[in-house]
Image (spheres, grey):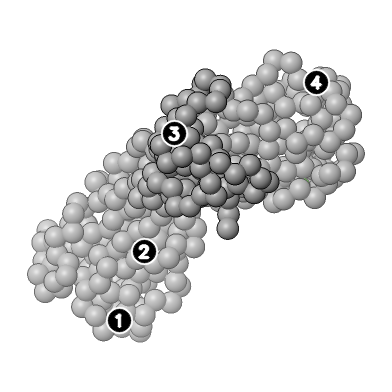
Amino acid sequence: MQAMEELGYFSPDGQSCSEIGQWVDSITGFSSEDAVAPLWGSIQVIGPPDVYPIYGNSELTWAPHKNSRDDDEYIQVMFAEPVLVTGVDVYETWNSGFTTRILAFDGQNWVTLWSTSTPVFIEEVRVHNPTLEVSGFLTREIKVHGDCRPSNSSIEIDAIQLRGYSASCGCVEISQWAQTLTDFSSEEPNTLWMASQVLGVSDAYPSSSESMGKAWKQTSSNLGNDEYIQMRYNNHVYVTGVDVYETYRPGSVKNIDAFDGSSWVTLWSNPTPIPTAETAQIFTPVLNTPYVYTNELRVRVDCQAGGVTDSVQLDAVQLRGYSCEQTCELLAQWVQSVADFSSEVSNVDWAATKVIGAPNVHPSYGDLSEAWAQSVKDENQYIQVIKLH
Ligand SMILES: [Ca+2]
Ligand SMILES: [Ca+2]
């Protein structure tokens, strides 16, 4: 029997949460990189450490260009999943001690998690994981700044780990309907089938026969294999899902793309879609690339799918994900009840039930009856507790 259950964090719906660690997934920027990159290039920080715990000059690390070894070199990295950040580990493997700032992108701004004005020179490997000044907000992008002056030489980072709790632990997924059109390939001249019919809450599904005036339809005189509609939403989110309300020729969607602020990223694709026999469906594919931070989607459809040329009708497109503007909160809990214990002084004073709820002895120290104490003084005393969830 386990003596004591660890006090953990919980999501609003009671899901138990534990901290997860991720290695770098991709590079989004850097001040400079070595002249012989990819050796000593920025991509060398992708993935788990491959130099650490060895201390020494290695081409399997990122190093700034030798003509640019100044006081403010940086590397900017992306991780696969946004987390409620709790820690960052910088693997310094040559001329260590150089890290001056660690920042995280919160969806709108770069937030300083930690900084120092006094970098040092340490001639041994260092995993730099300082206590953060700010933590607990949603991020998947980190920037690490270093100063080459303490060693007056190259600085080298082998890997970077982002630690934190999954967004699902503290945040509530939000759903949104499209607000504005930003582009489309064609629309039926008849105003009842205009592209704008895809905006707003679904008003045709599950009917396919009543979509007129409620769904987007392409120009019937020129139906291509890559028709598209592009729309914007009110809130930026880390995408977790897209629901396409198809009300005629469902199964014709070939791509769902998201604009990440600089380029279009494919969330899901199927180059050869086959329309189904269904007359209407809500298409919710498992995304190949989730968590893109976006407020703009593009849905591409194949009007020649399955060897038949016909228009496709889309009623609405819902975007789901985690928003940085919402409140995300990790809940810690006090014990709700006691399931078992080895012994107690009495069932009143020093009872096992005294561990229930918030502390009422702490910060005092002493032999006080509002705490659990044992009647048997041996080497194997325990208490087993139950939390709210
Ligand atoms: Ca490396
Ligand atoms: Ca509609």
Q: Secondary structure at mark 4?
A: loop
- Three-letter code for the amino acid on which mark 4 is drawn: Val
Q: Residue at x 13, y 67 (%)?
A: 211
In the displayed structure, does residue 171 sit left or right of residue 202?
A: right
- Three-letter code for the amino acid on which mark 2 is drawn: Arg
Residue 289 is situated, as x and y percent measured from the top left of the image, at 49, 58
Q: Earlier in the sequence, mark 1 or mark 3?
A: 1
Q: Secondary structure at mark 2?
A: strand
Q: Quadrant of residue 67?
A: top right
Q: Earlier in the sequence, mark 4 or mark 2?
A: 4
Tell me if mark 1 has few (under 14), some (14-19) or many (20+) residues whose alpha carbon lies within 10 angstroms of its own: some
Residue 210 is situated, as x and y percent measured from the top left of the image, at 9, 70
Q: Name the residue tied to disc 1.
A: 276
Proximity of marks 4 and 1: CB atoms separated by less than 8 Å: no
**Mark 1 and mark 3: span between their CA atoms?**
70 Å
Q: Earlier in the sequence, mark 3 or mark 2?
A: 2
Residue 249 higher or lower than 238, as above or below: below
Residue 374 is situated, as x and y percent measured from the top left of the image, at 56, 40
Residue 15 is situated, as x and y percent measured from the top left of the image, at 42, 52
Q: Name the residue tied to disc 2.
A: 300
Q: In front: mark 4 or mark 2?
A: 4
Q: Name the residue tied to disc 3.
A: 349
Q: In front: mark 4 or mark 1?
A: 4
Q: Earlier in the sequence, mark 2 or mark 1?
A: 1
Q: Name the residue tied to disc 4.
A: 120
Tell me if mark 2 has few (under 14), some (14-19) or many (20+) residues whose alpha carbon lies within 10 angstroms of its own: many
